[in-house]
Amino acid sequence: MIRPLGTPLAVPALHVTNAGRDCWMLRDPTFAGLDRIERQALLDWLAAARARGIDAAVDFARRPWDAGELEGVIGIFETARPIASWLVVRYQSQWVVVTVTDETISAVRDSLQEALELIRVPGAL
C-alpha cells in the first residue's frame, strides 16, 4: 500500500475512496485546537448527529494555508458530500458557524456546543 508523502506510518489511518480517488484519513481525529471538554462535546454531538445525516467532523487546525488569528476550524460533512457543508470557526474564544452552501455566518456563540446546535441538515429530523 502506498501512502501519500508526509503521512506518518505510525498514525492509524483509514483508507477511503472518494470519487474514484484513494485517500487516507486519520482514524481518530485529534482536534488539536480543542480542550478535553470541547473535544468530548464534539464527539457526543457527532455521535447523535450521524442519525441526522452528518457523516464526519474534520479538524482543519493543521492546515497548510495561513488563517491569520483563527484559533480553530472544524469542517462538518454531510453524508455523501465530498466537501464540508459547515465550518465551525473559533476566534478569540468565541465560535461562529459558516454555512458553505449559502455563504452565511451565524451570530457569535460562547461555546462550541452552542455553535454545533445551529447545524441542521435540510430534510433531516
Image (cartoon, helix red, strand yellow):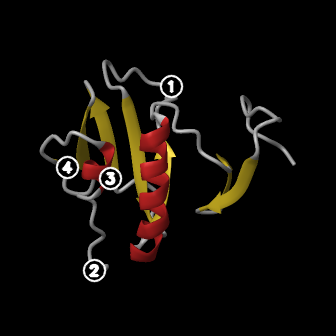
Give the labeled residue for mark 4. Answer: 103
Nearer to us in this view, 33 or 8: 33
Q: Position of residue 2 (x, y in %)?
A: 83, 44
Q: Which amino acid does label 2 sit on?
A: Gly
Q: Earlier in the sequence, mark 4 or mark 2?
A: 4
Q: Which amino acid does label 4 sit on?
A: Glu
Q: Distance between the residues labelled 1 and 4?
A: 22 Å
Name the quadrant containing residue 15.
bottom right
Q: Distance between the residues labelled 1 and 2?
A: 34 Å
Give the residue furthest to the left.
107
Q: Earlier in the sequence, mark 3 or mark 1?
A: 1
For label 1, the SS is: loop
Give the labeled residue for mark 2. Answer: 123
Q: Where is residue 100 in the image (x, y as percent from the top left)?
A: 28, 52
Give the labeled residue for mark 1. Answer: 64
For label 2, the SS is: loop
Q: Is residue 82 visible?
A: no
Give the residue furthest to the front.
37
Q: Distance between the residues labelled 4 and 2?
A: 19 Å
Q: Is residue 100 left or right of residue 26?
A: left
Q: In this view, does 27 lie to the left or right of 12?
A: left
